[in-house]
Image (cartoon, rainbow, N blue to C red):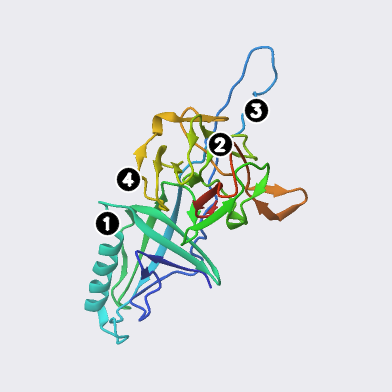
Amino acid sequence: MPSYSLDGVPLDHPAGCWRLKKGTERRPLPGARAVKVSVSGRHGDIPVVGLDLEATTFGLAFKVTGATPSGVDGGYEQMERNLEALSALLGVRHRLMTLRYQAGTIVRVTDVTITSTTKPEVNTGAATARITAIVEVPGVLWRDEAESIWSGAPNQLAQVVTTLAGSTGPIVDAVLRFTGPAVQPSIGDVATGGWVLRAGGLLSGQRLLIDCGRMQAAIVTSDTWDMSAGSDVTGEIDAIGPGSQYRWLHLTPDVAVGDPFSRAVLVSTAASGTNASSKVELRATRAYL
């Protein structure tokens, strides 16, 4: 059975203090942010691709009981205490919370906020209450729990990023690392045609870090992913392709022809002046709609 936890707390309490009602929604699929462009003398609308996704919202419906944390029936008073504890869990507003969804071996996580809760429907005689929390996923996408690192050739077309295979959504916050020597290192997403590059060169032992999510870059001289350990070169990074004026590389899974179970992220890399020690690495977590 699928289950949720919020900030590490099971939303089906182990002792039965509260539990999600049967039929609780699966994480919903996001919709595209609609853009319509029409011109005189042309039927319909001009097709627009690459639309951004809207934030998703869904409900989590709870039944609160009178069980104590040790599993003993505590009656109406305990139900009130359980309702207060659940309200405290759902009432965090000063930060995003981590919602974890699990169905068998499938685990997905995302940052959420609880935008509202319904008025509790209390059954005094049965010492139970029903309440629904409205969950918003501002960042839209769900992720794996752990990051992975992929290593590839610095000058090769259409390489499969094996660690991101199976994704269904774009990875917008990958961190790239080029190891020198390399002149004008660049990397592109095959599916969208977007590229990110630096016109300068890297000496042997230097590494160029590019954080696509934060749109920052630095050169470091040690084997690290810490951008603060190097010198900032953000102003030397160029991005080209769809949406590049306000974002850097979005790694997008492509579906193999006729096989929706085969989903791969393909990247192309280019650089001159490389040798056997040159390489490109990519640190990211898979993303899901």
Left-right relation of 109 to 155:
left
Q: Are marks 2 and 1 in contact (CB under 8 Å)?
A: no
Nearer-N-terminus badge (1/3): 3
Q: CA distance from mark 4 to mark 3?
A: 43 Å
Nearest-to-viewer mark from 2 and 1: 2
**Residue at label 2?**
186
Nearest-to-viewer mark from 4 and 3: 4
The secondary element bearing badge 1 is classed as loop
Give, as a three-letter code, the residue at label 3: Pro
Q: Which mark is residue 92?
A: 1
**Residue at label 3?**
47
Q: Which mark is residue 228?
A: 4
Give, as a three-letter code, the residue at label 2: Ser
Nearer-N-terminus badge (2/3): 3
Q: Residue at position x 60%, y 49% from top?
A: 276
Give, as a three-letter code, the residue at label 1: Val
Q: Position of residue 218 (x, y in %)?
A: 39, 40
Q: Residue at position x 49%, y 70% from top?
A: 22
Left-right relation of 251 to 17:
right
Q: Position of residue 240 (x, y in %)?
A: 55, 29
